[in-house]
């Protein structure tokens, strides 16, 4: 009997750990990933990564590390200067490594082809970085993708320590972090700020393709950024054929001036107390930025919920109070009718295509396939209503096609010129091709609103003014016999489409607004319009990212450092400099 018990325990262990390994799909793990960043007073950084890999299940020659160094910023190339100083084990003994440049990444392959390693292996990578900091008028900032989101295996423990230079105003230091897969805006645990040192960690482990991104800001003056001459030198080195776009850019601007500007005469913005008549939340959000995005889709869902077509249940939360996005439940209450737009009807039908009750997990990697058709219906409705002369998508598509055609013409023309003139080919080809990307850029601005569309946009801006600046007296003046709730809910979907849901909720603080029946929030939570609106905003953000998610293709993690934007406003996991990923070989 004792022998049978031992065998049963052993069998269970094999099943548990075998299932874990199979779920991961790989034969190694990262036990810990510790990043130490020393910011220097000359605006450079010294970065030390300590990666502990577990090769217990199967031996490997080593690991490879990919770090993005080339980004897109303000329409031009931006090369971060990165120099590897050392690659060692945990005892300071040098490891063999080879570096290569692949696209915009620096790739380090660590290990020897003739030697297989097993067990826990420590890899210490030390490198220095130039052009890794962001400078703003109000503060200097480190926005850094500490671990990268391109690792195919889980990271059991991730930490980051940032040390700022002497002379920094310690009272001005602020920090935050983001965790999750690339693009996630989920805030990480509260960082620890101790003078010039900021420490970050992650609650629990990071799953495959998830990472930790850190943001640290401080008052300007502690670091000396490069002067104008050096910045211009870097720019020319990164974009040495910049002359050609400067020739074509004015021509394209003139074309936009003639064909792309909105029709009609600009008018003044007057405060509006309701959305423009006939515009759904989806159409309003599309009219403002001329494209259908996830915020517009989730605003449409909330609009349908307000009108009684569905109920949103976001009561499932984690231990720390975060919404469990995939557990958000949508329940269909009414069938589509003539009061809905074609796009709203399609949205309701596709969300509930299989059942009257669906969780967001059931829409993940599926619903994205309907978005192009949903966008087309929205554009067509705006054209039919007279807000556009032509579909914005069609206009953009035409200009993108023109860009492709122009690139082909330029390359062929450049090759002919080289053969005839006998000139070096590379500069001519690059100079010719660089004019073509300007057309896709211009394509963004070429959709042209009619005079009616221009007036509608001005009305929407007036509505924004009201949502942001509404005073108690104005709200009371618009409260009918049924109280404040009808007015609050009537503009709620539009506030979502405009990214102002929290501001709208705050306006009703202290006023009696019953909790909406169409939305189920966390049980036991205090009910105020401000807290409720903030929770709704987080829920719809999660809904949007889940509904538009596509099956992940093969490849490493990305980075968006090229935006040059602050990590404190619109930051996300995978944003900032650094990052990338790696693997074992």
Image: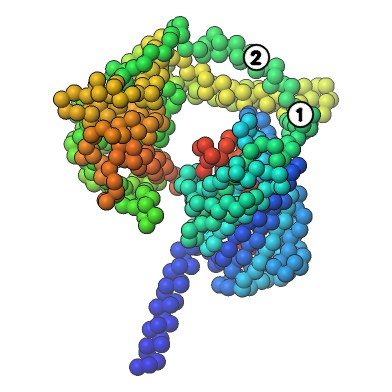
Q: Earlier in the sequence, mark 1 or mark 2?
A: 1
Q: Around disc 1, counting alpha carbons within 10 Å, would you say few (fewer than 14), some (14 to 19), or many (20 or more)?
A: few
Q: Nearer the viewer, mark 1 or mark 2?
A: 1
Q: Residue 126 occupies which quadrant of the picture?
A: bottom right
Horizontal side of 95 relative to 408 (left or right) equals right
Residue that appears at 77% across and 65% down: 94
Q: Is residue 455 left or right of residue 332?
A: right
Left or right side of 71 for 212: left
Tell me residue 553's x, y (percent): 51, 48
Instruction: Give the position of the C terminus as an image quadrant.
Output: bottom right
* Residue in the picture at 30% in, 31% down: 508
Mark linked to residue 250:
2
- Do the residues under discs 1 and 2 have CB atoms within 8 angstroms? no
Q: Is residue 53 above or below residue 475?
A: below
Q: Which residue is mark 1?
A: 228
Label 2 Cα crowd, 10 Å radius (few <14 / some 14-19 / many 20+): few
- Measuring from the top left, give residue 518's x and y in whole percent: 23, 39
Residue 199: percent from left, percent from top: 58, 54
Q: Residue at x 31, y 52 (%)?
A: 316
Horizontal side of residue 106 vs 498, given as left or right: right
* Total numbered circles: 2
Residue reaching furthest right?
422
Name the residue at 30% across, 25% down: 472
Q: x and y percent of residue 430 in the render?
A: 72, 29
Q: Describe the element under mark 1 as helix, strand or loop.
A: helix
Residue 172 shows in this picture: yes
Residue 559 visible in rendering? no
> Where 270 falls versus 372 (above or below)?
above
Q: CA distance from mark 1 to mark 2?
A: 25 Å
Quadrant of the frame with the N terminus? bottom left
Residue reaching furthest to the left? 481
């Amino acid at each position: 009997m004792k022998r049978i018990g031992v065998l049963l325990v052993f069998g269970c262990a094999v099943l548990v750990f075998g299932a874990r390994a199979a779920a991961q799909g790989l034969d190694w793990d990262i036990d810990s990933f510790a990043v130490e960043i020393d910011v220097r007073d000359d605006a450079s950084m010294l970065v030390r990564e300590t990666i502990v890999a577990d090769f217990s299940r199967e031996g490997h020659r080593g690991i490879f590390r990919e770090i993005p160094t080339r980004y897109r910023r303000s329409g031009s190339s931006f090369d971060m200067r990165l120099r590897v100083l050392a690659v060692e084990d945990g005892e300071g003994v040098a490891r063999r490594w080879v570096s290569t440049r692949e696209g915009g990444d620096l790739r380090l392959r660590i290990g020897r082809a003739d030697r297989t390693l097993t067990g826990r292996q420590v890899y210490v990578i030390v490198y220095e970085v130039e052009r890794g900091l962001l400078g703003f008028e109000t503060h200097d900032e480190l926005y850094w993708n500490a671990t990268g989101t391109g690792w195919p295996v889980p990271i059991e423990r991730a930490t980051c320590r940032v040390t700022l230079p002497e002379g920094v105003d310690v009272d001005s230091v602020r920090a935050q972090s983001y965790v999750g897969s690339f693009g996630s805006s989920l805030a990480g645990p509260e960082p620890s700020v101790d003078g010039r040192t900021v420490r970050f960690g992650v609650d629990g482990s990071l799953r495959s393709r998830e990472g930790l991104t850190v943001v640290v800001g401080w008052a300007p003056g502690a670091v000396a950024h490069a002067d104008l001459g050096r910045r211009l030198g870097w720019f020319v080195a990164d974009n040495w054929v910049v002359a050609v776009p400067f020739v074509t850019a004015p021509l394209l601007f003139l074309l936009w001036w003639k064909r792309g500007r909105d029709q009609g005469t600009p008018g003044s913005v007057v405060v509006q107390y309701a959305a423009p008549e006939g515009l759904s939340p989806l159409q309003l959000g599309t009219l403002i930025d001329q494209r259908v995005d996830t915020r517009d889709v989730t605003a449409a869902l909330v609009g349908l919920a307000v009108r009684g077509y569905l109920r949103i249940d976001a009561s499932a939360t984690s231990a720390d109070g975060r919404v469990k996005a995939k557990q958000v439940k949508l329940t269909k209450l009414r069938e589509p009718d003539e009061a809905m737009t074609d796009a709203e009807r399609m949205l309701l039908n596709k969300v509930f295509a299989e059942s009257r009750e669906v969780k967001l997990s059931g829409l993940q990697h599926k619903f994205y396939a309907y978005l192009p058709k949903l966008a087309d219906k929205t554009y067509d409705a705006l054209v039919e209503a007279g807000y556009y002369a032509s579909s914005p998508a069609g206009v953009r598509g035409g200009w993108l096609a023109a860009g492709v055609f122009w690139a082909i013409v330029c390359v062929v023309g450049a090759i002919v010129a080289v053969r005839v003139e006998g000139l070096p080919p590379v500069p001519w080809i690059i100079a010719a091709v660089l004019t073509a990307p300007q057309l896709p850029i211009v394509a963004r601005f070429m959709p042209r609103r009619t005079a009616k569309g221009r007036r509608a946009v001005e009305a929407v801006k007036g509505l924004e003014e009201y949502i942001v600046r509404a005073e108690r007296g104005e709200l009371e003046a618009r409260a009918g016999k049924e109280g404040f709730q009808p007015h609050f809910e009537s503009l709620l979907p539009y506030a979502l489409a405009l990214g102002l849901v929290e501001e709208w909720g705050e306006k009703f603080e202290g006023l009696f607004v019953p909790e909406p029946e169409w939305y189920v929030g966390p049980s036991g939570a205090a009910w105020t319009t401000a807290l409720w609106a903030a929770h709704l905003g987080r829920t719809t953000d999660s809904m949007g990212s889940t509904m538009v998610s596509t099956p992940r293709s093969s490849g490493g993690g990305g980075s968006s450092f090229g935006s040059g934007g602050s990590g404190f406003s619109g930051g996300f996991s995978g944003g900032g400099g650094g990052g990338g990923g790696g693997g074992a070989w």
